[in-house]
Image (cartoon, rainbow, N blue to C red):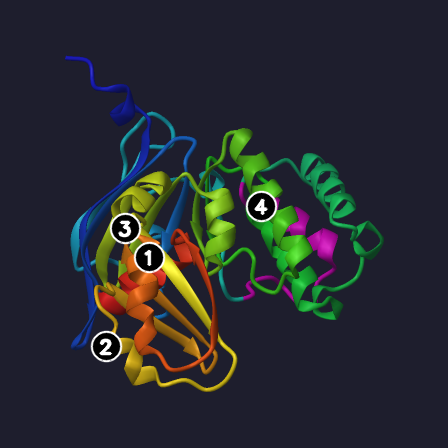
Amino acid sequence: MTKPKRMQNRVLNVKSIHKSFSSVTAVDDISFSVEQGDIFAFLGPNGAGKTTTLRILLDIIKADKGQIEWNLDGRVNQWPQANQIGYLPEERGLYLDVPILKSLVYLASIRGMDKKAAKKSALEWLERLGLADRAKEKLQVLSKGNQQKIQFVASILHKPAFAILDEPFSGLDPLNQEIFIDFIKEINKQGTTILLSAHQMQLVEKTAHKIFLINKGKALYNGELSGIYDTYGNHQVIELRFKSSFDKEALNTIKDVIHIDVVDDSLAKLTFDQHKDMKSILSALTVINSDFDISSYKPSLHDIYLNLVKTN
């Protein structure tokens, strides 16, 4: 029997993996799959189990239980070849005292890329990043943002079939963050499947096709990006911006509130059911004896993410 097309294109299958350190459970029976051509966002707060999972995928540490199946070349096996994987770690991992171009060419060559082709491609990337005139400088003299750019190039220069990008937007200003979204989409269109881990939800919304949300080692959501809005975003958020200090306890007396998020001393966000009409909401807000401006909107991925993490 012919397998469904979706199964045939699966390049990574994670089955019920579990990992503990002493008495702490870092990853608790999680499963997910990544298909060829995906931009798959792996999300969660600090300490959720993301880094542990990524290290298991890269065979840096072993899972206590569960199974990892890779299928990047038409054969199901446990671990891919070095040239098939690109890895951008959250921590800086390049040689700080080696000239930038030399470092890029060396790293690409040990992943199977011809040195001449690696040098040509590296110079093209440096030109695009506005760093061509610094090719012979050492990485340690660059700013944090420029170091991140070089580390990104190092992870994808050899054109891997699968790239794991851990916090690729770290250290970048807003303009360069947007540029990096285009880079990620570009290499994805060229054939690289991407697993992306990031904290900037507004950037994930612009980039990813699918998401996996983890907290305290457990899966909270696994599926299409659009599906999380259908499942958790069918509410309306009322944003109250106060003109002076307000009674935070009074918010707890408002009827029919699903979730309350006091952002700071002047801003609170209240979540109501999508079918709650504005007239009823405004009536419920009369219990607040403070002046405020009000606005209403549908939850963003950031709002959904915070709500799920706080309540699970």
Residue density around tag 4, few if under 14, some if 14–19, many if 20 or more, within 10 Å: some
For marks 3 and 1 on the same chain, the one whose residue lies earlier in the sequence: 3
> Label 3 is placed on what type of residue?
Tyr
Q: CA distance from mark 4 to mark 1?
A: 40 Å
> Label 2 is placed on what type of residue?
Thr
Q: In the image, what residue occupies the spot 66% across and 67% down?
A: 144
For marks 4 and 1 on the same chain, the one whose residue lies earlier in the sequence: 4
Query: With 248 as the anchor, is 4 left or right in this view?
Result: left
Q: Is residue 110 magenta?
A: yes
The residue identified by callout 1 is 279
Relative depth, front residue between 296 and 131: 296
For marks 3 and 2 on the same chain, the one whose residue lies earlier in the sequence: 3
Q: CA distance from mark 2 to mark 4?
A: 43 Å
Choose mark 3 or mark 4, whichever is in front.
3
> Label 1 is placed on what type of residue?
Lys
Q: In the image, what residue occupies the spot 27% across and 66% down?
A: 259
Q: CA distance from mark 3 to mark 4?
A: 25 Å
> Label 4 is placed on what type of residue?
Ile
Choose mark 3 or mark 2, whichever is in front.
2
The residue identified by callout 4 is 181
Choose mark 4 or mark 1, whichever is in front.
1
The residue identified by callout 3 is 232
Q: Quadrant of the N terminus?
A: top left
Choose mark 2 or mark 4, whichever is in front.
2
* Span of residues in magenta: 92-111
Q: Are marks 3 and 4 in contact (CB under 8 Å)?
A: no
Q: Secondary structure at mark 1?
A: helix
Q: CA distance from mark 1 to mark 2?
A: 17 Å
Q: Quadrant of the C terminus?
A: bottom left
Q: Secondary structure at mark 2?
A: helix
Q: In the image, what residue occupies the spot 37% across and 52% down?
A: 42
